[in-house]
Image: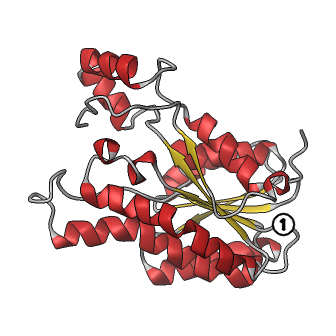
């Protein structure tokens, strides 16, 4: 299937590894111009080397939780090819303890900034550079933690991801006034070399095997590429009639005594 993305200008945040890098590879395979962003230049340079199929690859170092850097990122990315067609907001994370008692006000604010506030900021900044393009689309990366407290890890993380899902319909209606589609993709537990699940598997193989066996009808964790392909489809004109929705990519994950990683 031709997704109609050849030549599309795609900006992916948090793109140096994991789901962000996998999304960049998937979009590159469709012939997109790729703009990678993260906080670490050396990681971006290494990631860019993996995107040989892209029409072109640009890297921009930026911390999107800093308003001035987020604005500079959008401005530079749009200037590279005269606008933006696709924005994938992939930056996220959590700070603080796993209980309410262990998490400070600063932990909550930092987690909200990492997941929710910077995403809103990036969308707002992107509007003038995406409006009027043939098929502009934004994909926000949330998580199944946004509706499953047992899988959230921490209250602040689950609340931040839930906000992305909750507001998708409202944001999509507002963005459509500018001709921009907006959808959310919510991954379940994803196994990426070096991430929390990979470390847990090495440190506690029995606990990992028990969780995989009882928590996943399909008998394994997900792969970043499986999320990335959904992101690419949702960003494409082929998904034009899908707007303001949340798409889980979780292999029917069940909250079976989710381990603390």
Q: Which corner quadrant of the image does residue 137 belong to?
A: bottom right
**Camera-side residue: 200 or 52?**
200
Q: Which corner quadrant of the image does residue 60 belong to?
A: bottom right
Q: Which corner quadrant of the image does residue 80 belong to?
A: bottom right
Q: In the picture, which quadrant includes the N terminus?
A: top right
Q: In the picture, which quadrant includes the C terminus?
A: top left
Q: Is residue 141 visible?
A: yes
Where residue 255 sits: x, y (%)? 34, 34
Work out whether 214 lies above or below 186.
Answer: above
Where residue 112 sits: x, y (%)? 35, 68
Q: Residues within 10 Å of mark 1 (few under 14, many from 20)?
A: many
Q: Residue at x 85, y 74 (%)?
A: 133
Which residue is tagged 1? Answer: 135
Work out whether 64 lies above or below 225.
Answer: below
Q: Is residue 51 visible?
A: no
Where residue 225 sits: x, y (%)? 62, 36
In the displayed structure image, the side of residue 80 where residue 171 appears, left or right: left
Coloring basis for residues: secondary structure
Where residue 250 sits: x, y (%)? 51, 36
Q: Secondary structure at mark 1?
A: loop
Work out whether 253 lies above or below 232.
Answer: above
């Amino acid at each position: 299937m031709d997704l109609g993305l050849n030549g599309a200008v795609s900006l992916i945040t948090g793109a140096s590894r994991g789901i962000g890098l996998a999304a960049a590879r998937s979009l590159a395979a469709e012939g997109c111009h790729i703009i990678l962003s993260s906080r670490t230049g050396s990681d971006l340079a290494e990631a860019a080397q993996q995107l040989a199929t892209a029409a072109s690859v640009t890297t921009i170092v930026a911390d999107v939780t800093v308003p001035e850097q987020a604005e500079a990122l959008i401005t530079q990315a749009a200037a590279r090819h005269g606008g933006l067609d696709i924005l994938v907001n992939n930056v996220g994370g959590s700070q603080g303890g796993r209980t309410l008692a262990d998490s400070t006000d600063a932990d909550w604010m930092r987690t909200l900034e990492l997941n929710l506030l910077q995403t809103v900021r990036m969308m707002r900044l992107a509007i003038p550079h995406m409006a009027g393009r043939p098929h502009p689309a934004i994909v926000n990366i949330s998580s199944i933690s946004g509706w499953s407290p047992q899988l959230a890890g921490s209250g602040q993380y689950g609340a931040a991801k839930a906000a992305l899902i909750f507001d998708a319909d409202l944001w999509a209606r507002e963005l459509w006034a500018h001709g921009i589609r907006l959808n959310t993709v919510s991954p379940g537990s994803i196994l990426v070399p070096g991430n929390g699940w990979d470390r847990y598997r090495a440190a506690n193989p029995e606990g990992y095997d028990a969780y995989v066996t009882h928590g996943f009808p399909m008998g394994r964790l997900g792969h970043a590429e499986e999320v990335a392909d959904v992101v690419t489809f949702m960003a494409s004109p082929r998904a034009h009639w899908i707007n303001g929705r949340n798409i889980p990519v979780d292999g029917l994950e069940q909250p079976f005594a989710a381990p603390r990683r």
